[in-house]
Image (cartoon, helix red, strand yellow):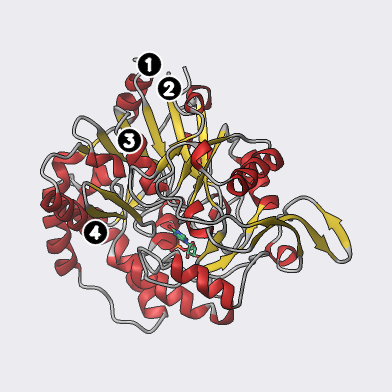
Amino acid sequence: MPTLVIVGAQWGDEAKGKLVDVLGSQASLVVRYAGGNNAGHTVIAEGKEFKFHLIPAGILHPGTKAVVGSGMVVCPKGLLEEWDRTLSQKSDLGELIISSAAHVVFPYHRMLDSLEEEARGNNKIGTTSRGIGPAYQDKVARIGIRMGEFVDAARFPSRLREVLEVKNRYMSMFGKEPLNYDDLLAEYTAYADRLRPFVKDIEHMVAESVEAGERVLLEGAQGTFLDLDSGTYPYVTSSHPVAGGACLGTGIGPRHIDAVLGVCKTYTTRVGSGPFVTELNNELGDHIRTIGKEFGTTTGRGRRIGWLDLVALKHACRLNSLSGLVVTRLDILSDFESVQVAIGYELDGQVIEYLPGDADTLSRVKPIYKEFKGWKGNLRGARSMSDLPVEAREYLDFMAEFTRTPVAIVSVGPDRAETIIADESLIWVK
Ligand code: IMP
């Protein structure tokens, strides 16, 4: 039962898309388990750049089933645009399947996302304004519209009427005009008509693949510290990007997961507000942002940049029970005289070696750094660990030793080919 979870081990944007593409070619089934089009994955393959926000990157492989999982919230318009764009770039795609249990994002969710952010004043979360929080609020409040109901022409009109009545009351609270039911129904019925053939119950299909011993890849979005429960609350997203979310968002029980790979950069980035212990609010940070092209795929926002935080990464290894690390963007840190990594924190004059759970406390800690000699040269041609400069290998060895998690894969460039498999046995276990 080679079932593999891929999870972001930092604050998202760890370049998981490329990995899901590389490993997706070896899987029968790729299921994304959480989030919505707040995520953005860029995949460079066959000389083309593919951008995904909702569809698992595994779709690029004919013969692979790419599933939009039950834990996701889906903007139908965004999904159809993405599907049409991907089809126009490549005609031989995998099979797209959308879980009937995934929730639908409507325009009122996006509007409320922006209105709620505005109302937060100085305490903004810095959301992507894609309606993600409000869509998950509806799910938890048990008034959300799921994909199965959405594509059921007999049920959707009355469900929309019922929910819109409530949402329009919120709109008026914010002094906004109500949304028109007929217009919304007409627009969304057209989307539902196109999406109907893709919508299915997925649990039995996923279970059958797992039982048949097929390779199943469970694709996370966002990252560990954006997790609603385990992240830097309230500066988090509204879903569960951690590995546990893979069980919730696909219907697989924890005993059927064989390996969990955590993707992390050789430095740290985050977008939106919230504590960031190793942040480089200086020219060096600006330089890394520029050479690393660290701008959001979804919003275009410049990402905040910092040194690698091993205290946080070790915490992520535990939270996700990582069996291996996938270290990305090693090439970007080339040609620095020295690089730093946080190996401890100072909190109110005391040294601590764990990540405080409270965001306010975390914002008060100071990093304790260990310095490494930098490495030189263009790493993009490296295809094995022995091709890497000794300084880069020492850096990777220290990451593994500190976090007590072995390095499985190293990425040295954006292309599929620019990948080093450090330990194949950590990927498809069994
Ligand atoms: P939301 O998910 O749009 O509600 O945003 C909540 C927080 O999560 C904000 O700080 C966002 O910037 C962050 N966030 C959401 N999705 C991503 C992602 O894919 N990468 C990085 N940050 C994200």
Residue 360 image position (x, y, % from top left): 71, 67
CA gap, disc 2 to disc 4? 32 Å
Name the mark on residue 2.
2
CA gap, disc 3 to disc 4? 22 Å
Residue 99 visible here = no
Q: What element carries label 4?
A: helix
Question: Which residue sits at x=66%, y=55%?
Answer: 309
- Relative to the observer, which residue lies in front, 354 or 403? 403
Is 234 displayed left or right of 68 in the figure? right
Residue 139 image position (x, y, % from top left): 41, 51
Q: In this view, does 115 lie above or below 377?
A: below
CA gap, disc 2 to disc 3? 13 Å
Q: Name the residue under label 3.
A: 24
Q: Name the residue under label 1.
A: 211
N-terminal of the two: label 1 or label 4?
4
- Relative to the observer, which residue lies in front, 360 or 261? 261
Residue 108 visible here = yes
Q: Are marks 2 and 3 in contact (CB under 8 Å)?
A: no
Q: In this view, does 386 lie above or below 288?
A: above
Q: Are marks 2 and 4 in contact (CB under 8 Å)?
A: no
Q: Mark 4 is on which residue type?
A: Gly
CA gap, disc 2 to disc 1? 10 Å
Q: Name the residue under label 4.
A: 78
Question: Which residue sits at x=58%, y=73%?
Answer: 284
Q: Mark 2 is on which residue type?
A: Pro
N-terminal of the two: label 3 or label 4?
3
- Relative to the observer, which residue lies in front, 164 or 329? 329
